[in-house]
Image (cartoon, rainbow, N blue to C red):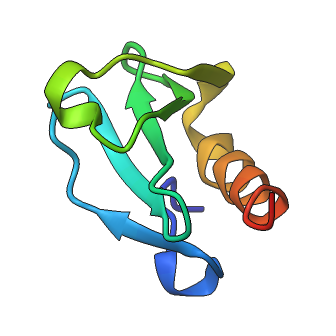
């Protein structure tokens, strides 16, 4: 199982290029610019966080969705959160 998300299947979100080395993948919600980042937290775990639209300027976390997720579970967890939060 891959720990990468295929963005084309997530309605309302667009994959964007990560700005920082610790970010594995980043996605931006089209309607308001909210960013979801999958960040490495050590070798085998990841954090999923939300960032503001201008995250590349200060990289300030708005909210931590989940922390310490195993590598094999991160893609599914992030995908589920984005699907549930694409209409809000």
Drawn side of residue 40 relative to residue 9, left or right: left
The answer to whether residue 62 is above or below residue 56 is above
Q: Nearer the viewer, residue 18 or 77?
A: 18
Percent across and percent down for residue 24 are: 32, 43
Drawn side of residue 88 relative to residue 33, left or right: right
The answer to whether residue 42 is above or below residue 87 is above
Q: Nearer the viewer, residue 42 or 7?
A: 7
Which quarter of the figure has residue 59? top left
The answer to whether residue 62 is above or below residue 16 is above
Q: Residue furthest front?
A: 32
Q: Residue furthest bottom?
A: 8
The answer to whether residue 77 is above or below residue 33 is above
Q: Residue at x 63, y 29 (%)?
A: 70
Percent across and percent down for residue 88 are: 80, 57
Q: Nearer the viewer, residue 11 or 43?
A: 11
Percent across and percent down for residue 11 are: 65, 81
Q: Residue at x 65, y 26 (%)?
A: 69
The N terminus, quarter of image = bottom right
How many marks do you count on the picture?
0
Percent across and percent down for residue 32 are: 53, 58
């Amino acid at each position: 199982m891959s720990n990468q998300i295929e963005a084309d299947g997530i309605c309302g979100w667009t994959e964007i290029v990560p700005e920082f080395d610790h970010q594995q993948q980043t996605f931006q919600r089209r309607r308001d610019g909210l960013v979801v980042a999958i960040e490495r937290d050590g070798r085998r775990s990841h954090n999923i966080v939300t960032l503001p639209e201008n995250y590349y300027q200060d990289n300030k976390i708005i909210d931590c969705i989940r922390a310490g997720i195993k590598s094999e579970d991160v893609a599914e967890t992030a995908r589920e959160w984005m699907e549930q939060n694409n209409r809000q």
